[in-house]
Amino acid sequence: MTVVIRLTGLPATGKTHLRTSLAERTGLPATGIDDQRRRLLLPGESFPHGRDGIAWRRLRETIRSSDAVIVETSGASPHEHRLYLAGDLVFTVLCVADYDTRRRRLLERSRDPSSGIGIEDAARLLAHRPPKVDADLVVDTTDDAGIGQAVREVAQWARSRAVAAVGRA
């Protein structure tokens, strides 16, 4: 059985920031669907069209190869349901942020050429609807206080439910 700390939410809700903080705090490996997608990009692409299923398979393989892992996804893909079967212990954290914060973050990303997100992408991502997930914890990442509190709560959960997995990390 793999212990999965699943971070999900709309674009620009602080999932990656929380993932990094959790990995530092717990020592657990961290990955996400966007990591797998970036590995599949061809020159000039911002999304691996036609190869998204490959990215999900690789993410599932990464999860299965770990005793415990932090995984970042959007919550919007039908592939996600297949990731968490087979008796894995999953703790789902839904990241949220207010509209203005998300807008500011997406605009900042669109100005960074390495992000692969243009202004049109930012507008499209801002219009996404929230994922429908049953969350164990909802975290408002509008400010760092929400991130800090979430890191403490998730680390406590990991220690209480998966001591052996966290202890090996």
Image (cartoon, grey):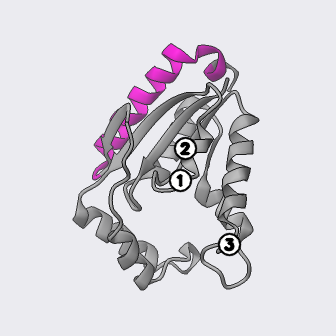
* Label 2 element class: helix
Instruction: Name the side, left or right, on which 21 lies relative to 29.
Output: left
Classify residue 88 by image quadrant.
top right
Q: Is residue 60 left or right of residue 107?
A: right
Is 131 above or below relative to 150? Answer: below
| Magenta-colored stretch includes residue 64 | no
Viewer-closest of 149 and 98: 98
Residue bearing mark 2 = 81
What residue lies at 65% left-to-right and 38% top-to-bottom? 29
Could you tell me if the residues under marks 2 and 1 are in contact, i.e. CB atoms within 8 Å? Answer: yes
Location of residue 126 by image quarter: bottom left
Which amino acid is tagged 1?
Pro
Write the residue at 49% across / 52% down.
Answer: 16
- What range is drawn magenta here? 142-166
Identify the amino acid type marked 3. Gly
Q: Identify residue for label 3.
A: 50
Q: Position of residue 130 (x, y in %)?
A: 33, 56
The amino acid type found where label 2 is placed reads His
Indicate whether 135 appears above or below 101: above
Percent position of residue 156, x then y = 44, 21
Residue at figure coordinates x 69%, y 44% from the top left: 60
